[in-house]
Image: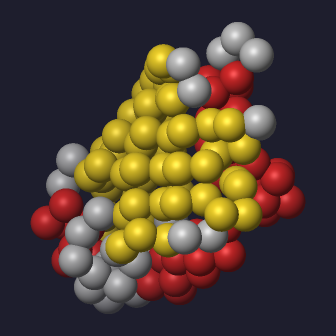
Amino acid sequence: MKNEAKRVVSAFLTAVQNGDNEKLASLLHPSVSWNQPGENQISGIKKSNAEVFQMVGKMFELSAGSLRLTDITMIAANGNKASCVLRWTASQPNGNAMEVDNIDVYTVENGQIIQAEIFSADLEKENEFWA
């Protein structure tokens, strides 16, 4: 399907913004490979949608529920891959705050994300925040 990657990634990011876990689960392949950068509690390669949901749960725990995808600057597609520029914000009760831009690259097959590679514009800040 033409523009399938862009359509799936757009739907995924909208579901992230809306907290629609059912939609998120339908768009992540059960065996998704998710590469989260850094050297912190959430870093590493996740090898299933269950591991991705565990990571996101930990992010919400560490951010006292404040993690937000505040801006989707663009989504561009090339074949079955789509990249996007995203802005994330979060804060912690101790006053530590984070605002960071990411470039995410998603690979889509049969209407689901099978791979995600995340790039942070400020990995040092993310390592500090997610320590």
- Residue 43, given in percent of the width and then of the height, sits at 34, 74
Q: Residue at x 55, y 70 (%)?
A: 47
Q: Report whether 75 appears left or right of 109.
A: left
- Residue 46, given in percent of the width and then of the height, sits at 50, 71
Q: Residue at x 54, y 39 (%)?
A: 107
Which quadrant, please, contains the N terminus? top right
Residue closer to the observer: 24 or 68: 24
Q: Quadrant of residue 21?
A: bottom right
Residue closer to the observer: 88 or 97: 88
Q: Is residue 42 above or below residue 8?
A: below
Q: Is residue 52 above or below residue 25?
A: below
Q: Residue at x 68, y 75 (%)?
A: 50
- Residue 36, given in percent of the width and then of the height, sits at 38, 64
Q: Residue at x 54, y 19 (%)?
A: 79
Residue closer to the observer: 61 or 26: 26
- Residue 33, given in percent of the width and then of the height, sits at 52, 60
